[in-house]
Amino acid sequence: MTSAAAFFTNIATSGMGRAFRHRDFTLFALSGWVANSGMWLQRIGVQWLTWEITGSYGWLGAMAFADAAAIMIFLPISGTLADRGNRLVLSRIAQFLLMGLSLSLAVATLAGFINIWGLLVFMALHGVFEGFWTPLRMSITPNLVPREDMPSAIGIGSLFFNLAQFIGPAAAGILIAVFADRQIGIGVLFVITTVSFFGYLVVLFIIQLRQDETKAGPRASFLADFRDGVIYVARLRGLAWFMALMLVTTVIMRAFRELLAGYADGQFQAGPEGLAMLTSAIGVGAVAGSIFVANYKSSAGMTRLLYWSFALAIVMQTGFALAPTFWFALICTAGLGVTVAVGGIGSQILVQSAIHGEMRGRVMSLWSIIVRGGPAVGAWTIGTFTDIWDFQLVMMVATAIYLVFYLAMLPKAPVITATLESTPEDRA
């Protein structure tokens, strides 16, 4: 057997591919990949439509913030619901709502009714429905495979998400450019998104969870369940510190993705094709990072890897801010894609492995507030300041602030490692 064949055989049998041994997970992951590709078509369409209407970094940030603010408000509620109700039934409802919303946006865009305020309302509603869906999706994945295959399942899910981030924007740039009327091209993107969501909905009627993690016995009140989730996180000191680290990381080091339409056109006059290339570059880097992390067989050593990825992000974002040419910007953007994937997948593996199953929905809803809301808050803040001052200056100041925080958090690494690289049974 050649070395290449041995490498791929190892991936399939003992690496990230081992989760594909489970039929329901495979269906869920593949349909999720198609739906995420559609989601990226929609995301690029909304970004470019916003930029064409306003030409404002601030409005790009505001769109991201409208989405994230609704997500952040609704996530704690939906996370608690995910621990109290039937996760599959709730998931079907959430996916139906997302599909209906995309269809409404497609009709309004193709009919020429859409404007900046309509887009803002759409993004807010999308945030509500996505906030409903996210804790359910994150709670389902670990319940489609046995515990020993959980890192593989999470890694594959993230790899497919990042593959979608590569394919979706590339397809979006081509489709928008094909149509003489860009708004018609964007409307077609939204139609394709609707179809991709429908496939995901069908799969949710086919799969079955391996176990019911709903807590047995008498139920506490809804508010008491939510409070217990917050207390659970606060009592795990390493988890609480890690969430604080990830909050600042997402606000400062992930905001660049929401500003790429302005960056592509405002800094390099590259148009929608440039936006697609930059977003696809993130996807290429993220795929590489995903494959690397997904082949970890356990969480041991994962915390150290994350700290190194955050350090690399500082270097790459500095290059991104000061890029003298578009091609240099593409390289830095791909590097940032690696750090986004390593940080996103590695952190989710650590958190999912370290928590009790009956708390999963609540903890992951709080986690999702950070990873979904942080970039939007950062994009709105950085975008607003960029409308006043130079883009490069604002990005460099933000990166410098993160560097100071990162150095201050280094002494917390042993506590974080001890908590997140152990299971609930190890700490019992």
Image: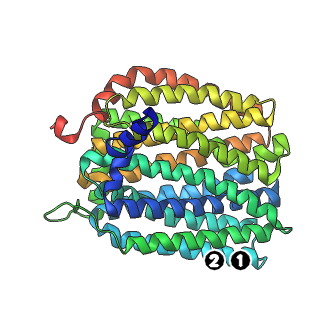
Residue at the image point whose x is 17% and y is 40% from the top: 425
How far across and how far down the image is residue 52, in percent?
81, 59
Kind of element beneath mark 1:
helix
- Image side of residue 278 versus residue 291, left or right: right
Residue 311's quadrant in the figure?
A: top right
Kind of element beneath mark 2:
helix
Tally of marks: 2
Estimate how packed mark 1 is, as few (under 14), some (14 to 19) or many (20 or more) residues with alpha carbons within 10 Å: some
Q: Which residue is mark 2?
A: 104
Q: CA distance from mark 1 to mark 2?
A: 6 Å
Query: Split into 4 quadrants, where in the image is the C terminus?
Result: top left
Q: Which mark is residue 296?
A: none
Tell me if label 1 and label 2 are in contact, CB under 8 Å. Answer: yes
- Image side of residue 161 versus residue 256, left or right: left
Residue 36's quadrant in the figure?
A: bottom right
Q: Is residue 393 visible?
A: no
> Hey, what amino acid is under mark 2?
Ser
Residue 79, relative to residue 91: is it above or below?
Answer: above
Q: 216 or 180: which is nearer to us?
A: 180
Residue 156, relative to residue 204: is it above or below?
Answer: above
How far across and how far down the image is residue 232, in percent?
27, 45
Q: 42 or 34: which is nearer to us?
A: 34
How far across and how far down the image is residue 9, in percent?
38, 42
Q: Is residue 259 visible?
A: yes
Residue at the image point whose x is 31% and y is 36% from the top: 298
Residue at the image point whose x is 65% and y is 73% from the top: 191
Q: Which residue is mark 1?
A: 108
Query: Split into 4 quadrants, where in the image is the N terminus?
Result: top left
